[in-house]
Image (cartoon, rainbow, N blue to C red):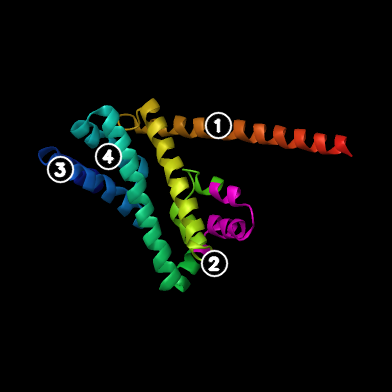
């Protein structure tokens, strides 16, 4: 299955190289499909978009355009799922969430009042974004809030993949994803320590004021 996927990408690459006008369409379409079929590797698709658009528009412009179009395509796919669950397939996707430990936990987080915690979880590139999207779509979240959370998290994830993908050259060395994960969790650990330090400092200031 994975070999067929890469063969299809090679065919698509050749078509786009012969028809450069089609590159932006592909850059939107691939992340859109990934949002509908989450088994597709988003990292590979983002790298593919950057490669094609850099050839067509130069490295700086192509990279920026790839990021913008990838975010747009990914968001559109997730928003389509959101609308379908809200208005047509709620019961079917409820089972998918109930069967997933991540889905059940995230559903409880979404029902809470901490929007930034929801955004933090949704911005984790190693979490199953499709399950998280199913879970948040099953709540009574207002559409503007959903748009903010989803669009912001897509921007963060895709920027993260672009930055670390360029650092670790994942297209030529796929095993470097291990180092990418280690880097991510190292950054996550630093953020956690900073947040803990900030929280302790705030508590000391509050205790000192009493």
The boundaries of the magenta stretch are: 97-119
Circle 4: element type:
helix
Residue 184 seen in this snapshot: yes
Residue at 51% over, 31% down:
182
Find residue 178 and report its image quarter. top left
| Residue 184: x %, y % from top left | 51, 34
As for residue 102 lying within the magenta part, the answer is yes
Q: Which mark is residue 87?
A: none
User: Who comes first in sequence, dot 1 or dot 3?
Assistant: 3
Circle 3: element type:
helix
In terms of secondary structure, what is the magenta stretch mainly?
helix
Q: Which mark is residue 21?
A: 3
CB within 8 Å, label 4 to label 3: no
Circle 1: element type:
helix
Q: CA distance from mark 1 to mark 2?
A: 33 Å
| 159 displayed left or right of 64 | right
Residue 3 seen in this snapshot: no
Circle 2: element type:
loop
CB within 8 Å, label 1 to label 2: no
Residue tagged 1: 187
Q: Which mark is residue 140?
A: 2
Q: CA distance from mark 1 to mark 3?
A: 38 Å
Frontmost residue, 161 versus 168: 161
Mark 1: few/some/many CA within 10 Å (<14, 14-19, 20+): few
The quarter in which the C terminus is drawn is top right
Mark 2: few/some/many CA within 10 Å (<14, 14-19, 20+): few
Find residue 177 and report its image quarter. top left
Q: CA distance from mark 2 to mark 4?
A: 35 Å
| Residue 7: x %, y % from top left | 20, 44
Residue tagged 4: 49
Mark 4: few/some/many CA within 10 Å (<14, 14-19, 20+): many
């Amino acid at each position: 299955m994975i070999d067929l996927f890469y063969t299809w990408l090679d065919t698509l690459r050749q078509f786009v190289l012969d028809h450069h006008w089609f590159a932006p369409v592909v850059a939107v379409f691939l992340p859109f499909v990934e949002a509908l079929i989450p088994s597709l590797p988003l990292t590979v698709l983002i790298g593919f978009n950057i490669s094609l658009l850099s050839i067509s528009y130069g490295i700086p412009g192509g990279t920026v355009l790839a990021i913008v179009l990838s975010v747009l395509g990914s968001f559109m796919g997730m928003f389509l799922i959101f609308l379908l669950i809200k208005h047509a397939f709620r019961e079917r996707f409820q089972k998918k969430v109930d069967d997933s430990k991540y889905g059940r936990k995230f559903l409880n987080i979404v029902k809470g009042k901490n929007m930034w915690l929801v955004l933090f979880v949704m911005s984790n590139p190693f979490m199953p974004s499709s399950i998280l999207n199913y879970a948040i779509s099953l709540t009574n979240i207002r559409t503007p809030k959903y748009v903010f959370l989803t669009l912001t998290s897509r921007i963060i994830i895709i920027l993260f993949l672009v930055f670390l993908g360029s650092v670790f050259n994942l297209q030529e060395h796929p095993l470097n994803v291990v180092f990418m994960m280690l880097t991510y969790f190292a950054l996550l650990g630093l953020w956690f320590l900073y947040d803990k330090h900030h929280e302790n400092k705030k508590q000391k200031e509050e205790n000192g004021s009493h």
